[in-house]
């Protein structure tokens, strides 16, 4: 949990760095959380949520690189949308 908090605190810095590398782009982000503690908490709180929001087999990027599901993950997907 501490590592997740530390990483989340770095997201504004990451956004700023990406904006500097890609001036004139609008950054869009997607956050996905799928670790066992989240699933357990949702179950205990009786919160219905579609399974596909918490689980995936793998994420394939546009350049063919893949990110396999490990069962305990969270991911941030950032994309630069050109304003031209």
Image: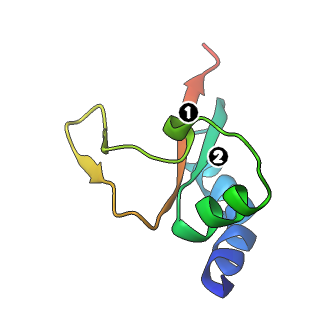
Residue located at (33% from left, 55% from top):
69
- Residue 42 figure quarter: bottom right
Q: Which mark is residue 19?
A: 2
User: Seen from this angle, which residue lies furthest right?
Assistant: 45
Vertically, is 4 above or below 51? Answer: below
Name the quadrant of the C terminus: top right
Rendering coords of residue 5 (x, y %) = 71, 77
Residue located at (76% from left, 47% from top):
47
Q: Residues within 10 Å of mark 2 (few under 14, many from 20)?
A: some
Is residue 64 left or right of 78 when viewed as pictured? Answer: left
Name the element at disc 2: helix
Judging depth in this view, the residue of 4 and 82 nearest the camera is 4
Rendering coords of residue 78 (x, y %) = 55, 42
> Which numbered disc flags the more N-terminal residue, 1 or 2?
2
Name the quadrant of the N terminus: bottom right
Rendering coords of residue 18 (x, y %) = 58, 50
User: Seen from this angle, which residue lies furthest bottom?
Assistant: 2
Residue located at (77% from left, 51% from top):
46
Residue located at (61% from left, 83% from top):
3
Are the residues tagged 1 and 2 within 8 Å (C-beta)? Answer: no
Judging depth in this view, the residue of 83 and 50 nearest the camera is 50
Q: Give the spatial CA distance, label 1 vs label 2.
A: 9 Å
Name the element at disc 1: strand
Q: Which mark is residue 80?
A: 1
Name the mark nearer the viewer: 1 or 2: 1
Vertically, is 64 above or below 2? Answer: above
């Amino acid at each position: 949990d501490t590592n997740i908090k530390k990483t989340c605190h770095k997201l504004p810095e990451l956004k700023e760095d990406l904006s500097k590398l890609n001036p004139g782009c609008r950054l869009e982000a997607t956050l996905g959380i799928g670790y066992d503690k989240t699933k357990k908490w949702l179950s205990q709180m009786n919160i219905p949520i579609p399974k596909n929001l918490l689980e995936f087999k793998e994420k394939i990027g546009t350049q063919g690189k893949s990110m396999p599901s490990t069962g305990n993950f969270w991911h941030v997907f950032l994309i630069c949308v050109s304003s031209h």
